[in-house]
Amino acid sequence: INEYLHVLNHAMPGAAVVQEHMVETHPALTEDCYVKVFTGDDEMADDLEPQFVLPIDKLFPAKQAAQLKAAVGKSMWQAIHIPTTVSRTCDGGTTSRWSAMQIGMSFIGAYKMCAGEAAVADLAFAAKHAG
């Protein structure tokens, strides 16, 4: 998961991770972009690099933190902030596709999967039917 988060935080601002022929975005234009995760499972959170974790206990009062952690449980959620420049210059569809494409490519890159339509289709199918 740490490797995936490293790759995703590199890709989300506009860097190419699988598509070597793609153009990359200048980092100065995307410095407000990040991906972090949160979970209700302290043991799982402890296994992750701290720069990728939203610490529920530190961000909420104790009672609210306990309620939130109980509700989230052992699942893990991503909080994504795409570059502001994308939101200000593109339509809503593009902002959704921006994160979706980077998530897919990062997953493929981090777990050394074959890229292409088949891999993306498998990921989309699994994500749609998970849970």
Image (cartoon, rainbow, N blue to C red):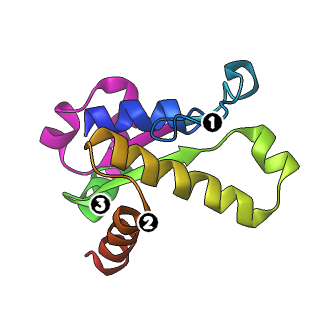
- Cβ–Cβ below 8 Å for labels 1 and 2? no
Numbered circles on residues, count: 3
Asked if the stretch drawn in magenta spans residue 45, the answer is: yes
Identify the disc placed on residue 14: 1
Residue 1: x and y, percent?
Answer: 25, 40
- Quickly name the residue at label 3: 72
- Dot 3: what SS? helix
Q: How busy is the neighbourhood of tag 2: few (under 14 within 10 Å), some, or many (20 plus)? A: few
**Residue at the limit of the structure toward the front, as seen here:** 21
> Was residue 108 drawn as part of the magenta stretch in this picture?
no
Numbered label attached to residue 117: 2
Residue at image position (80%, 39%) is 85
| Label 1 or label 3, whichever comes before in sequence order | 1
Query: Which of disc 2 and disc 1 is earlier in sequence?
Result: 1
Residue range (magenta): 35-63
> Image height check: is 126 above or below 37?
below
Give the residue type that dot 2 points to. Glu
Q: CA distance from mark 1 to mark 2?
A: 20 Å
Identity of the residue drawn at 73% across and 19% down? 28
Q: Residue furthest top?
A: 28
Query: Residue 131 — which label?
Result: none
Quadrant holding the C terminus: bottom left
- Residue 128, image x, y percentages: 37, 77
